[in-house]
Amino acid sequence: MNKWLFGSRKSGTQQSTNVYNDVKAGLQAMYKKYLLPIESEFKYQQFYSPLLTDGDFAAKPMVMVLGQYSTGKTTFVQHLLERDYPGLRIGPEPTTDKFVAIMEGPMDQVIPGNTAVVDPTKPFSQLSNFGNIFLQRVSID
């Protein structure tokens, strides 16, 4: 029944087993070996989403902070970071006009969403599905 997935397992034969140092490396290798050729063959990226890049596998976990206007989201993020970040905007009127992803890096910089989605080292290529208007409201700090 699962012969297509696991292959035939005859007793007495040696199966080649790949051992990976971590789960991420194993998933990345299996994706490139098994899924990527199928996705490329059937042009999966043209009708659903872009193919996964090395940046998608190297990405660290992300946390999304949501809430009503003036409820302390920015203050919470400042407390977690123990400092201000480059795209920080606080004001008496609503300043919730964009999505901000904060990443660690060697220097403080603001990367526009349009630039972030084409950078293969960053895990944001999937955001290109939402279009250019959305990407104008995204920044990576």
Image (tube, helix red, strand yellow):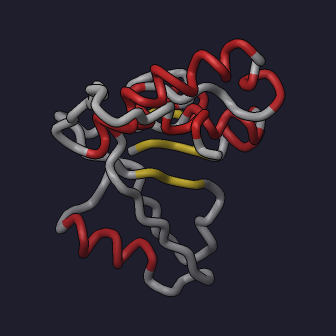
Task: Pick out the residue farthest to the right.
Answer: 47
Above or below for 43 versus 141: above
Q: Position of residue 89 (x, y in %)?
A: 46, 61
Residue 25 spot, x, y in % from top left = 28, 34
Please report the residue visible at 62 percent of the width from the left and 74 percent of the height from the top.
93
Residue at x 22% of width, y 64% of height: 81
- Residue 24 lies in quadrant: top left
Pick the residue in front: 38 or 110: 38
Q: Nearer the viewer, residue 119 or 141?
A: 119
Q: What is the residue that sits farthest to the front in this orientation?
A: 12
Residue 21 locus on image (x, y percent): 16, 38
In the picture, measured across the screen, residue 115 lies left or right of residue 11, that is: right
Quarter containing the C terminus: top left
Reply above or below: 26 against 69.
above
Q: How many marks?
A: 0
Residue that protrudes farthest toward the top in the picture: 41
Q: Residue at x 26, y 30 (%)?
A: 18
Question: Percent from the top left, x then y, of residue 124?
Answer: 52, 37
Is 112 placed left or right of 50 in the picture?
Answer: left
